[in-house]
Image: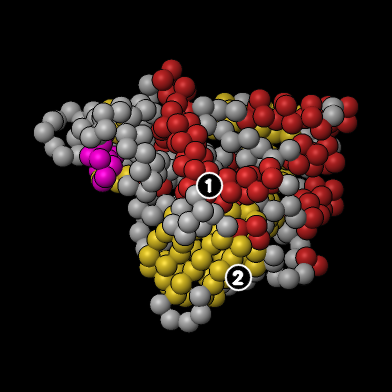
Amino acid sequence: MRSARRYTPTNSRFFTTLVRWTYGIWLRLAYNIQVVGLDRVRNLHPPFVLVGNHTNILDPFILNAIIPHPIHWVTSDGNMRKPLIRFLLLKLVGSIPKSKAIPDIETVNWIVEVIRKKRGVVGLFPEGQASWDGCTIPSYHSTAKLLKILKAPVLLGKTQGGYLSLPRWTKFRRRGRIILDFSILFTPEELKILSPDGIYARLEAGLFHDETAWEEKNRIAFAHPRRAENLELALFMCPSCSSVATMRSSGDRFFCSSCGLGLQFDAYGRLSAPEEGGRESGNPTGSQGASAPATVREWEAWQRKAFREYVLEAAAKENETPLLSSENVRLSRGWRMERMKDVGRGRLALYRDRLDFTPGTGPALSIPAADIEGPGVLKKNLFEFYVEKSVYRATFPDLSHTGRSWAAALEILGEKAAART
């Protein structure tokens, strides 16, 4: 879809109603969803904008189960590269494509069309991606400017318990409780008089949610026998030995394959020493003697700082040792929503000034770090980045190779380069 004129967001009311009364009912039962402020939803009629904090991949479906109107969700075009999914999202749901982390005037035009011409409902998550640790990510400031342009009512659907029910890094759902709290965040009159900065401040305050603090207060069990599995997609750096990409998981255990740090992830989202002792992976301090943070939120805060130091220190060394490397990576290249084509399978390595890909057969590829834009993670572990108008996707051989570390490293290198100019 290289021309915006070829696509007009159109939502099938029959399809969305069918999904709401089938899959939507199952979601409400399976995740024990409770709704607060339902009267505000019933009394609000299109056009309006629905915003929410992004806790897991099911957020749009959960909100769709409550809102009695078709919703045109702003969706990453990375989700639309398979023909069947593209058909469902574009032809039946009327999703509005967005290039991940890159401003897109086409997206704004489609949103304006839905609100002003079609007098419909636009749904968006201002954070741009689901949270890795259960705490709200700062929103893009451009969202505030967009809301001021639209001057349509803004309905906030705040999700609590969504992260612990299905964390971004896992496929195993836990039945605890999800609370959806609806409120009117802005009226058209307020949007007219507020400045973009004032809109942004209220938007951030309305969206903010810390799942760790909420769980400590409510003490709701989110149990599953394999609840720690793939936690290394979020927490990829060991707090005991500071190794990168050595964390592993199995069942409810989370451990470092380098120093022997071993923890248990409980039903309340906390990490602690295993109940039974004497296991190689059961040392709560690791061979280095440093204790681990007690929650994913605390670990993430430590990791953000420690990984930045690791990248900057490695980048300062003038040698050809890669900051990150992985074997048997499948690299693909595409454009927007078109089907991606394989570049090859081989070794991916990130250096302080470039990203190299050496396939088993065929020519090698070297991309200057300065040319890379919008590095990020699609879904759980697909590492994507843009070079001019092309999007590249790296698929790792298993879930122990986290794409998040690659995206974070490139962001740090980009900030360092920008600071020098």
Q: Is residue 64 above or below residue 219?
A: below
- Which of pointers 1 and 2 lies earlier in the amino acid sequence? 1
Instruction: Work out whether residue 338 can be spotted.
Output: yes
- Where residue 120 appears, as percent x and y from the top left, is 76, 48
Q: Which residue is identified by label 1?
A: 316
The circle drawn on residue 19 is: none
Q: Is residue 281 above or below residue 245?
A: above
Instruction: Work out whether residue 161 can be spotted.
Output: no
- Where residue 60 appears, as percent x and y from the top left, is 57, 46
Instruction: Identify which amino acid the numbered label 2 is placed on.
Output: Gly
Residue range corresponding to the magenta coloring: 251-264
Q: Which residue is identified by label 2?
A: 334
Residue drawn at x 69%, y 66% as measured from the top left: 389
Residue drawn at x 32%, y 34% as measured from the top left: 240
- Where residue 369 appears, as percent x and y from the top left, is 60, 58
Residue drawn at x 67%, y 29% as measured from the top left: 204
